[in-house]
Structures are given as C-alpha cells and as structure tokens.
Amino acid sequence: MWGSAFWGDLRFAWRGLRKQAGFSVIAVVTLGLGIGACTAVFGLVEGVILRPLPYREPGRLTAVWITSTRESGLAKIFANYADYAEFRRTSRSFESLGAATWATNIGRVMTGVGPARNVLTVPGTVSFFETLGVPAAIGRAFRAEDEGSGCSLLLAHGFWKSGLGTRESIVGQSLTLDDKTCRVVGVMPESFSFYPRATQAWMLLGRDYQNRQDQLLVGIFARLKPGVTLAQAEGELRGLYRGLHPGKQSRDFQPVVYDLHGEFTFLAGRTLRTTLLLVFAAVMLVLLIACLNVGNLLLARLSERRRELAVRAALGSGQGRLIRQVLTEGLLLAGVGAGLGVAMAWAALRGFRAADPIELSVGANVATNWPVLGFSIALAFVTTLVFALVPAVRASRVDLTVDLKAGGRGFVQGRQRLTRAVVSVEVALSFVMLIAAGLLMTSALRMGSENLGFRPAGILAGRIKLPATHFATAADRVRAYDQLTSGLARVGRVALGSRVPPEAGGNEVLEVQGRTSAEMHEVGVDAVSPEYFEVLEIPLLRGRALGPQDRQGSTAVAVINEALAARYFPGSDPVGQEIRIAGTGMSWLTVVGVVGNVKHTELMNEMSWLETPMLYRPLAQDPRQTVEVAVRAARPAAGEIEKQIGALMRPFQSANWRVSVRG
C-alpha cells in the first residue's frame, strides 16, 4: 500500500517537473554540481584517510619514532638499530617488531639486466614483512637464514612487471646492485606498498649492516598485542630507552608510538589530512548554498501552485499528504542530481588518478567504490531534507478561503520574507568561503613570490651516483667531477653539490673551537664545487667563496650562511673561526666566507620558508659518491646535457652510472 502510494507520488512529481523543464534543469544541475564535488572529495577522504591499510589486522600496526623533548625541528627522527634490537628483544607490548630505513641514500645502480638503472631499494629486517603480515606473491619473503648468505632482494610487483618483464624465473637468480651480487628471493603482491611508495625492491638488513648498529638509523614498525594501547606501549618503550641511554640523551630524546595509518598520511604530506578535511568542509558548504538556492526556486514554484495545493486539500489531502508530495518532488530532483553528481565524481577521480598531482599515502585507493556510492545516496536524502522540507511544510499550510482565490497574497508575502532570510544565510556563507579562499590564496602567493636566496630560472639539475668499486678513492671521484665540470662547460655554467636548492636543511650539531657546544641539532652540511655560489647566484656577503685551491691536502675550509653566522657568531666576525660537526670525526674547518641564506621547506613546516644554518665544504675536500649537477644555460636542453654526461662517463666502466635531469 505504501509502495504504490509512493510510486504514484513519484509519477505525479515526474509529470509536474517535465512541465517546468527550465526549473527542473536548473535545480538538477545545481544539485549535481554540489553533490558531485562532495562525492569526489569524499572519494579522496575515503581512499586516503578512512580506508584501512592493506595489511593483516592493520588496526594494531604502529610506527615508533624518536622525538626531541626540546627541539621542535626534530619532531620525528629515526632510531638507531641497537635501540630497535633491544626493543625487539625485551618489549612485552608488541607481538612483533620490524625495521626498515630510508635514512641513507637508497638509490642503487642495477646492472646485468638491460641498461644500467637507478633502483630505489629500501633495507629491511627479516621481521619487517612478518610484522605487516603480507606474504610474497611469488617466491617468499626474507628468512632468518638469509642473514648469513649475502645480499637478498625482495622485488616490488611494479618493478618486476615493468623493469624485469614479469619473469617468474627471476626468483632465485641474482641481480647486481652497486657492483654487489644480490639474490632475488621473491616478488611482493601487486596490492602491496610501503613508504616510500616508489620503492622498487627491499634489501635484507644482513649482518654487514647489523655490525654497524650504533651508526645505522631505522624506522621501527610494530604490531601491538591484542588489548595493548598506544599509551601503554609508549610507556614501556620510554622506560627501556632510559635504561639504554642513561643521562642527557634520555632527557633530550624519547620514543613515541604512532598509529601506522596516520603516519603514512603524515609522511605523504604533513598537511595532507588537514587539507583534505578542509576541502571536504568547503565543498559541503558549497552544497549547502546550492540546497538553499534550490529551496528558493522550489518556494517560487510552489507559490505558482498554491491554488492546485488548495484544491487537493479541499478534496481531502491532509497536511502530511501534501508534505509527502513536495518531499517526493524534492527527492526526485536530488536523485537525478545525485546521478549526475556521481558521473561527474567518477570522471573527476579518474582524471585525478591519471594526473597524479600530489603524493597520496600508502594504501590509498581513490575510486568511486561502494562506500563512495553509498555516501552519494545518503547525500541525496540529506539534501532533499535541507532544500525541500521547509518549502514542503510551508506548502502544507493551506488556507482554503484565501488560496482558492486568485493570487494567494498572504503566501507570497510569507515566501518573500522566507526568501530574504535564506538569501541572507547564503550571503553569509559565501563571505565565509571567500574570506577563507582569500587567505589561502594570499598564503600561496606569498610562498610563490618569496625570494629564495638564489635564482632558479634557467637551471637544470640532475643527480649522478658513481659506483663505489670504480671510484673507491677520493682522488678517483675528484678526477671524475673535474672532468664532468670541464666537459659540461660547453653547455653552460656548471656547479656540483651534494644538494641543489631548494633542497637544504639538516640536523647536525655544530662545535665552535674554544666554546661549549650548544648541542642543537639544526645545522645542514653540503659539499659543493667552487662555481656553486656563482652559478646559483647565491650572494657572497663576507670573506671569500670556495676556490680551486681548496683541494685535498690544503687547509680544511668552509663557507657558512648568514643564518649560521647570526646563530653562532652574534656580533662578531666568523671569518677565521674554526668549526666542525660534532660526533663525525671531522677535522676543524676554517671559516673563509659567509654567503646568503637559501630558503627551503622542511618536514614539519611545508607551508612556510625556513632559513637553516648551513655549512658548505669544498667538494674536492669531501668528494661524495652521489652529487647533483646544476647547469645554468641560456637555452636549457635536458637531452643535450644527458648526452654530454653519458659521453663523459663512458670511459669509467660501461655506463655504470645514473643521471636524471630535472628543471
């Protein structure tokens, strides 16, 4: 009985809306745009924030970081392997603990299978995959016996498919990474990923790594025992940490246990979660404004149907019956609008996946799936109540004496008052959104127009890694970099450095000769060629820049930036002072000059520019295995630069190098 009445109302509503096609199209498009925007953004929220991680019982998985109790810039840092080993041996709060690290250079040159390529390889422990509870799709994961049998590799499915041609026979064979033979033990499932998402292989943290426990930094990933809370586990680890590090270190640092899902979102983007929630709130406001607009249109339409509603009331339709009819019309409008919105959301999310504009967290799967469709259906019902309930109640208040006469002035006057109130609310909401958008645009424009301390226009940058076996000594690397610089001079002005701006920052502790160390983890250290500051147009403020005379065997020197000079030498001249990085065995360096600051972002401050204290060493005195090449050319040509680098490096053993050029 109820169903037949509803279908009757639905058919009547359809006929009425067809007669007023203009009103119907405007209402449907308005609702479709609002519902589509909300559905698309909810698809992102569901895929990134709400969707559980693709691991066994992901709710019990955690990440353990070490945090500083007095330095906000060191909010989360890696633990050393010795701490991980002790936590794993003595902790009672966790079912299992594993470790993996990207704290060191994880790009390794692979040879022996096609051309040399750079492979992103993350070292991990045997228990790492056991903790996640994900078995290999082909072959197996790491085992304890692998630790004593040399280098072992576990391949990501995407790399196995695109880089190795989906050959199942690769399991058990060997690949060469940085001239080191590694045996492939398995391939992970296609659905598996971990941070960093671009990881192509995992290398077992074998005994050669474990012998450097105090120097090896790792991320600790653990599975809580059933019933154990994050706070309980954190309390236990802090007690263990104090026992391992009595004295000052345990006062300055402490372990913190985080939910793994939240950490993946944090690692993908420090503001990713907040941004998605703010955007979702914004599109919900847009939908609310759209509902108010449609509600106004519905009020106007009902004023024209006043006589019709009075006749229906006179024939026996009660107030509830009239409300139901108007709500049915609203539901029909919202349903068609939701269908249009879902189609728009599907297209938007598909375009988002194709464009891949931002890094999403591990396990994110952005799609118009059943939860997203369910949200859209629920949204259709809610929007019906928002825009149709007030007009429905208003329409049900029929005065037969007045409304059966032509005009219905009392209703029109009442509608006008209600319309003015609705418009006032719309204007207020619009002002809120405009102010928020203005503040966001102002922040973005300020960041985009900020003087970064160097001139990025016309710079091409690439990274080169020299294989350790062919460039084992500092002299070998210096010769290679000298030849590279002179060869690329025909393309443009060339500079080499361990990093190229805006990559900067660091967390080293600086010592000044004759003073007590401040013990603040805030200094960055880069090794650069003499042309570095000139090519990047970083101004020299005092003293001299690094020169060709600063080589192996000459006085160890350094150039510092203005931020370091102001922090450690306030009111005095730093030129001639001696400094070094604590705890590294570095010799004392004589400061020969001061340069301007280069602004950059950092882990905890992605929406603001920072000026970190920086120390620059001559590349010839600290020749790194991996350097970045910056070329300033009048007509930048990435292909030409790669060709030149290839020709220059060819004499050094069969293309066993890697360069990637970026603008």
Image (cartoon, rainbow, N blue to C red):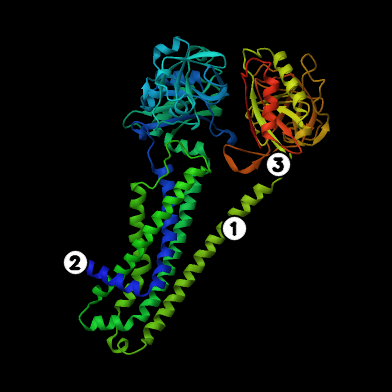
Q: Decide which of 44, 637 is in the foreground and name it.
A: 637
- In this view of the protein, can residue 214 be seen by the observer? yes
The kind of secondary structure element at disc 2 is helix
Packing grade of label 2 (10 A; few <14, some 14-19, many >=20) is few
Report if the CB atoms under discs 3 and 1 are less than 8 Å apart. Answer: no
Marks 2 and 3, the one that precedes in the sequence: 2
Residue extending farthest left: 1
**Mark 2 lies on residue:** 4
The three-letter code of the residue at mark 2 reads Ser
The kind of secondary structure element at disc 3 is loop
The three-letter code of the residue at mark 3 reads Leu
Q: Nearer the viewer, mark 2 or mark 3?
A: 2
Task: Report the side of 447 relative to 316 (left or right).
Answer: right
**Mark 3 lies on residue:** 452
Residue 579 in the image, given as x and y percentages of width and height: 74, 23
Packing grade of label 1 (10 A; few <14, some 14-19, many >=20) is few
Distance of label 2 from label 1 (alpha carbons): 51 Å
Up/down of 646 relative to 270, above or below: above
Residue extending farthest right: 543
Distance of label 2 from label 3 (alpha carbons): 69 Å
**Mark 1 lies on residue:** 438
The kind of secondary structure element at disc 1 is helix
Which quadrant is home to the C terminus?
A: top right
The three-letter code of the residue at mark 1 reads Gly
